[in-house]
Image: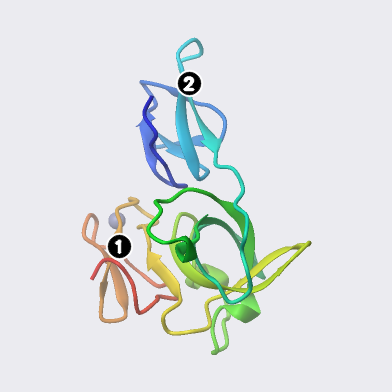
Amino acid sequence: MQKKMVLPGDVLSTEEEFEPGKNAFVEEGNVYSAAVGQPEVNEKQKSIDVKPEKPLRLLSEGGIVFAVVVLVKENSVNVSIMQNPEKGNSPVINQRHAMLPIRNVSRQYVESLRDNFRIGDLIKAKIARAGPLGIDLTTAEPGLGVIKAFCTRCRHPLHLFGRTLKCLGCGHTERRKVSKDYLLK
Ligand SMILES: [Zn+2]
């Protein structure tokens, strides 16, 4: 059995090979994951599902987490936490839902969340509040924000040139709340 982790926006197969099952969707002939988890092929139905990862324990306020953007709303971003770096070099193991409210994005005024985050972006964030009602994150520090983003046109990873993110696949340029630790420069 292959233990492979996929993120929202990752290509799972072509539409000719498999139909999208649970937590998957089709766009322009490809089947994409809509969740953080492991792909599972259903041979009978010729479909591919993504089985979501189990929740993670022991998250405390002030801790740094990595998370994937799953939904961008008007006043908040929903993310799935993927890893607890305080546990050392363990690979990407878990996920848990958390929220980034618009007031926590930056010290500067943020007009639109969609100018700062898109579905599938990988972010580095700090836990601002962890309680029974959920986890609030913050990215209002230079080291926090998006560390890997994908082209909204063709889904190639974006590279950072100065303060602009550029797609080497189609040439499109985009904006994000970029961390100083952005991965592709
Ligand atoms: Zn592109």
Tell me the quarter of the image containing the C terminus: bottom left
Q: Is residue 176 above or below residue 95?
A: below
Q: How far separated are the C-alphas under marks 1 and 2?
A: 30 Å
Q: Viewer-proximal residue, 71 or 179? A: 179
Q: In x, y percent, where is residue 121? A: 44, 60
Disc 1 marks which amino acid? Leu
Q: Is residue 129 left or right of residue 170?
A: right
Ligand 1: image quarter:
bottom left
Q: In x, y percent, where is residue 66? A: 47, 63
Mark 1 secondary-structure assignment: strand
Disc 2 target residue: 47
Mark 2 secondary-structure assignment: strand
Is the image coloured rainbow, by chain, by secondary structure, or in one colour? rainbow
Q: Viewer-proximal residue, 136 or 18? A: 136
Neighbor class of circle 2 (other Cα within 10 Å; few <14, some 14-19, many 20+) is some
Disc 2 marks which amino acid? Ser
In the image as oriented, which residue stretches furthest toward the right?
Answer: 132
Q: In x, y percent, where is residue 145? A: 46, 73
In the image as oriented, which residue stretches furthest toward the top?
Answer: 44
Disc 1 target residue: 158
Tag 1 and tag 2, C-beta contact below 8 Å: no
Q: Does the residue labelled 1 lie within 8 Å of ligand 1?
A: yes
Tell me the quarter of the image containing the N terminus: top left
Q: Is residue 88 above or below residue 9?
A: below
Residue located at (55% from left, 72% from top):
63
